[in-house]
Image: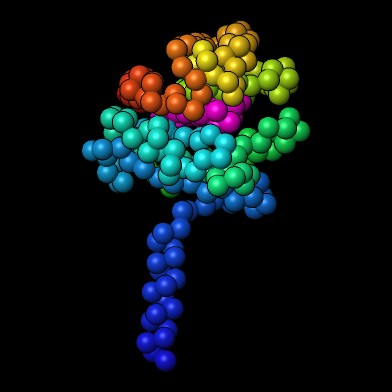
């Protein structure tokens, strides 16, 4: 009997160890999962700048780290949030206007809770790809006082998603977008950047490439830009 109890405890510990942590938000109605990665040379006990990473639709946080973020060299803590909606073999961010404010508020609450768990330097930076870039644009346009910068990769945001009264103090937004992107056209991204310029510093770097392979082409440049932003904190 004693051995059986020990086995149950061991299995419970193993499940806990390998399960990604979650936080409850929106008055406990929603759980947001996340993965924590420290860049090379950073310790879990260090006070570090924080980068919140939002993966693309159909992806997972751990896979996104290996695809896009493992070349960031500045000591930092990367918080990879899991999108809330099941999609294929991964997860997705909302696309409907009527759901966007709800899930964006969930992301904001999750970030605030996670910040309290880890010694952090300055306001978090946000990086998003594709569907995650849409959320990153939204956070930059509506929560400018809460973040240091936004990097939006291969994304866009419809202007009608943001009520006029919500525009305030848009943080610096740096966008990357492929000229041959056949998932989210560069024209859509350019329109997002153009109207956000009215509210804050927003730039786009276009390049010769598409959507899915952006990190084969621009990973080094994106990592270098993120390093520069993290050093500001």
**How many marks on residues?**
0
Q: Which residues are magenta?
A: 120-139
Residue at image position (36%, 43%) is 37
Q: Please identify the residue farthest to the bottom as the structure is shown.
A: 1
Counting from the top left corner in percent of width and height, residue 181 is at 54, 19
Quadrant of residue 121 within the rendered picture? top left
Q: Quadrant of the N terminus?
A: bottom left
Could one spot residue 87 in this view of the protein? yes
Q: Is residue 133 magenta?
A: yes
Q: Is residue 164 left or right of residue 12?
A: right
Residue at image position (59%, 45%) is 88
Counting from the top left corner in percent of width and height, residue 126 is at 48, 29
Q: In this orientation, which residue lies closer to the viewer: 83 or 46? A: 83
Residue at image position (28%, 30%) is 73
Please say which color scheme the image uses: rainbow
Counting from the top left corner in percent of width and height, residue 105 is at 64, 37
Q: Quadrant of the C terminus?
A: top left
Q: Is residue 30 magenta?
A: no
Could one spot residue 177 in this view of the protein? no
Q: In this orientation, which residue lies closer to the viewer: 35 or 42? A: 35
Quadrant of residue 213 within the rendered picture? top left
Vertical side of 50 occupied by 169: above or below: above
Residue at image position (58%, 31%) is 131
Q: Is residue 158 left or right of residue 183?
A: right
Q: Please identify the residue farthest to the left as the structure is shown.
A: 41
Quadrant of residue 142 within the rendered picture? top right
Vertical side of 73 occupied by 188: above or below: above
């Amino acid at each position: 009997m004693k051995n059986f109890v020990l086995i149950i405890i061991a299995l419970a510990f193993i499940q806990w160890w390998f399960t990604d942590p979650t936080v409850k938000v929106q008055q406990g109605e929603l759980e947001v999962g996340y993965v924590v990665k420290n860049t090379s040379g950073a310790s879990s006990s260090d006070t570090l700048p924080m980068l919140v990473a939002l993966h693309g639709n159909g992806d997972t946080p751990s896979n996104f780290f290996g695809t896009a973020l493992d070349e960031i060299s500045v000591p930092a803590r990367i918080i990879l949030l899991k999108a809330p909606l099941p999609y294929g073999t991964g997860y997705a961010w909302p696309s409907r206007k009527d759901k966007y404010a709800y899930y964006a508020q969930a992301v904001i609450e999750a970030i605030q809770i996670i910040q309290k768990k880890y010694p952090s330097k300055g306001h978090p930076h946000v990086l998003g790809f594709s569907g995650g870039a849409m959320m990153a644009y939204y956070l930059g346009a509506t929560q400018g006082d809460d973040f240091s910068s936004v990097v939006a990769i291969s994304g866009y945001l419809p202007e009608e998603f943001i009520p006029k009264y919500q525009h305030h103090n848009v943080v610096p937004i740096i966008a990357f977008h492929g000229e041959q992107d056949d998932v989210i056209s560069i024209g859509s991204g350019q329109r997002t950047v153009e109207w956000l310029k009215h509210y804050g510093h927003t730039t786009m770097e276009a390049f010769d490439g598409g959507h899915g392979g952006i990190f084969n082409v621009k990973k080094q440049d994106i990592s270098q830009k993120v390093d520069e932003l993290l050093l500001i904190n």
